[in-house]
Every structure is written in C-alpha cells, then in structure tokens.
Amino acid sequence: MKGGDQPGLMPLEVAQARLLQLAAETAVPEIESLPLQQVDGRVLATALVAGLDLPPWANSAMDGYALRLADWQGEALPVSQRIQAGCAPEALVPGTCARIFTGAPLPAGADTVEMQENVELDEAGRVRFLQALRSGQNVRPQGQETRVGDCVLPAGTRLGPVELGLAASLGVATLEVRRRLKVAVLSTGDELVEPGQPLGPGQIYNSNRRLLIAWLQRLGCEVVDGGILPDDLALTRQALADLAQVDLILSTGGVSVGEADYLGVALREAGELTLWKLAIKPGKPLTFGHYQGVPVIGLPGNPASTLVTFGLLARPYLLRRMGAQRVEPLAFEMPAGFVWNKAGKRREYLRARIEAGRVVPYANQSSGVLLSAAWAEGLAEVLEGRTLGEGDRLRFIPLSEILS
Ligand code: AMP
Ligand code: MG
C-alpha cells in the first residue's frame, strides 16, 4: 500500500476503492449450513433458488364467491361448495359458484372471484352479483411471485427479517451462509478509562470501544474485545501478539500526526502500516496495513471521526470481506436548510437532521462531539470546494443505513 506516500490528501473514493479491492481478495471463503433461526444478519453464500411455485396454486385474494366467468349470463348462481383456506376443493359444478375465503385454493373450473361486499343472497340462497365482473379478478394466479427455478436471492445477499420470511415461504429450513468475521477492537490511549471507574485527572471515558463493539455485532461480526492499550510499546507488542487468530484488527486513536504512536511502531515491527490522509472531515488520518498477515485498520480517536470513518470505510470493507454484494448505503439528495459560505479542501460529513424536508446540521461539528451523531439522523455531505445556499441540494446518508 503506497497511499500514504502520495502528496496531498487521498480522495474518499480512492480510499474506498482500495479497501474494497483488498476486501474482495480476502473475503471469507468458509461456508456454513445453518437453520433459518441462526442466519439473521449473515451473508448468503449460495443463491436461494425457488423449489416451489408461489403461490403453489391459484387462490382467492378476497372473501367472496368464485365462478367461471365465461359460463355466466348475469343470473343468480347457487352455491355448490364452501372452500376455506387449507381445504382441497372439488371441481366447480357448472352453473354454480363456490363460497371462498382469502387464501383458499380456487376450484378447478373457476377463474374469477367477487368480493362478498358486492353480492346479495336471494331467498333461495343464490348469489346475485351486483357489479360487472372482470375475468381473473381477485385471483392470485399460481406462480405469480416465484416459479420453480427462479433465483430468488442472489449469493451475497445480507439476510434480514424479510429474506428469512421469504426463505420460509419457499419451505427452506436451512441456508448456506458465509462464516462470521472475527474482529478485534482495540482502544488506545493513557487517558482512557472505562465507564464505571472513577475519572482521574486528565482522563476521559472510553466511548469508541462501546460504539464499535455494538456496531460490529450489528454487522454480524464476532468481536474480540482487546480493551484499552496504554501508550506503552512493550504492552502494545504484547497485546498484539495475543490477537493472532482474527480476521481484522480495528483500533482507534494514536494515528494523529506527531503522536507518540506505539501501535504504529509495534505494527511496523511485525507487519506493515501506511498512513492515509483522507480528504474528509472529520476523519482525516486513517491507517491500513497488516500484523503478521492479519489486516489492520486504524481509525482516528475522536468519536465523531471514528463514526464517520467506520461508517464510510471500515463498514463497506467488512461487508465485502463477508461476501456481501451491496456495501454502499442508500443516500438521498436533499435541500440544504443552512448556508455554507466557506468552500473546504476536505469533504465534510455533517451530522444532520431532516427538519421540514431540509437538512439541518448540528450546531457543534467538532470531531470530539459524539452528541452530534446522537442528535443527528444522518450524514450530510458537503463536497470539497463547494458552497451552499438555502435550498441547494446535497447528499444525505441516513445513519440507519450505515449503523447495521
Ligand atoms: P489520538 O488519535 O490518540 O490522539 O486521539 C485523538 C482524540 O480522540 C484525543 O482527544 C483522544 O483523547 C480521543 N480518543 C481516542 N480514543 C478514544 C476513545 N476510545 N474514546 C474517546 N475518545 C478517544
Ligand atoms: Mg491517543
């Protein structure tokens, strides 16, 4: 990796493309066959192919009466059978209709259903249809959703509630998925203390550890909690040596320029590390490399920078290594509800909300202020070199799109 050697700042797209390329080369190869109840959040390893027509037979979309439209002259029809969901109906007797309920199979010979609200029963119990009928109305034809052999979910699909429901609808009890990624999380810095402990002078609580562990778990990763690395070379070497069997080492802090960078030193001794200076704000410094062949991503330590760099760089990298096809979040063009006078050299990701259909940034965009992201609903992208007036459009990435 020669990224850090380039003069100037690295455009975000370049960093993303490099990481995705490296991720594709190291995607987890192992496949597991697991029951549906264990695959939420996993990535499908082999395509789900329909083994059934869905629906398996034509059925009624309404509670009503089924008839054969071509045989009907407008007369009232006697009811020859009653078909509930779960029943196997007889063929329709010519010159009659069938009482039918939602989801019940259409009897052979019938092709049309009228909803019960549009009929009247006469004294003899015959059904009078009150409105004109259209052939096939209120019928769900066999195979309208899937046909046997259709590719329903391609390999690389991230499985969620909808995909699990769909697999179940096809009678599939087991899916082939990629194994989980194992990610070690390291926080660095002598100033860090865990919640629940008293704060000494100059100390702050460790927020990134909880932020990243919860986020990685939502992404379906297995997390190895590496705790806090003090600013000490020997302890840092030792902590790294304990992390041999992971797919990624993810650290925060210690990548600012001019810092006594113990993690960087220890990593270079047993691997390789380059510093990328990204043309984004927050989150300029990012390191990438490996430790004894295990990939390492070092995120900046300020929590809002951690959020932005994890969301825009580490998350797609991890998803691609998991074998996921779609790794980019959905984003929307929205009108600005603010003015941006000073064109910047770096692309800014403002923690922002939508108010009355416009993007409104949090008042304090300092990279140390995680409250900005808690208040926000998304990241609003102000491109480098750009100024904005009220109503000018910019890209808005909902946080809900990147937080899982
Ligand atoms: P560093 O890159 O180590 O100089 O850290 C940059 C800033 O982020 C400093 O203000 C650190 O105190 C802060 N920081 C680093 N790691 C964490 C963390 N895990 N939780 C909260 N703040 C952090
Ligand atoms: Mg530090």
Image (spheres, helix red, strand yellow):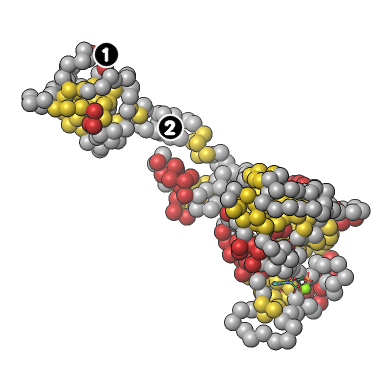
Kindly identify which numbered label has been placed on residue 139.
none
Q: Nearer the viewer, residue 223 or 237?
A: 223
Q: Is residue 174 above or below residue 222?
A: above
Residue 337, percent from left and from top: 67, 51
**Badges 1 and 2: C-beta atoms under 8 Å apart?**
no
Give me the residue at 61% from left, 64% from top: 374
Q: Which of the 4 image quadrants contains residue 85?
A: top left
Q: Is residue 232 above or below residue 97?
A: below
Residue 75 appears in view:
yes
Q: Which of the 4 image quadrants contains residue 138?
A: top left
Q: Earlier in the sequence, mark 1 or mark 2?
A: 1
Residue 276 appears in view:
no
Q: Is residue 254 above or below residue 67?
A: below
Image quarter (top left, top right, bottom left or bottom right) of the C terminus? bottom right
Residue 212, percent from left and from top: 64, 65
- Residue sitting farthest toward the left: 123
> Between tags 1 and 2, which lies in front?
1
| Label 2 within 8 A of ligand 1 by Cβ | no
Give me the residue at 33% from left, 22% from top: 136
Q: CA distance from mark 1 to mark 2?
A: 26 Å
Determine the secondary structure under disc 1: helix
Q: Quarter for ligand 1?
A: bottom right
- Left or right side of 340 for 27: left
Q: Amino acid at mark 1?
A: Ala
Residue 268, percent from left and from top: 84, 66
Q: Amino acid at mark 2?
A: Glu
Determine the secondary structure under disc 2: loop
Circle 2 residues within 10 Å: few <14, some 14–19, many ≥20: few
Kindly identify which numbered label has been placed on residue 145.
2
Name the residue carrying label 1: 70
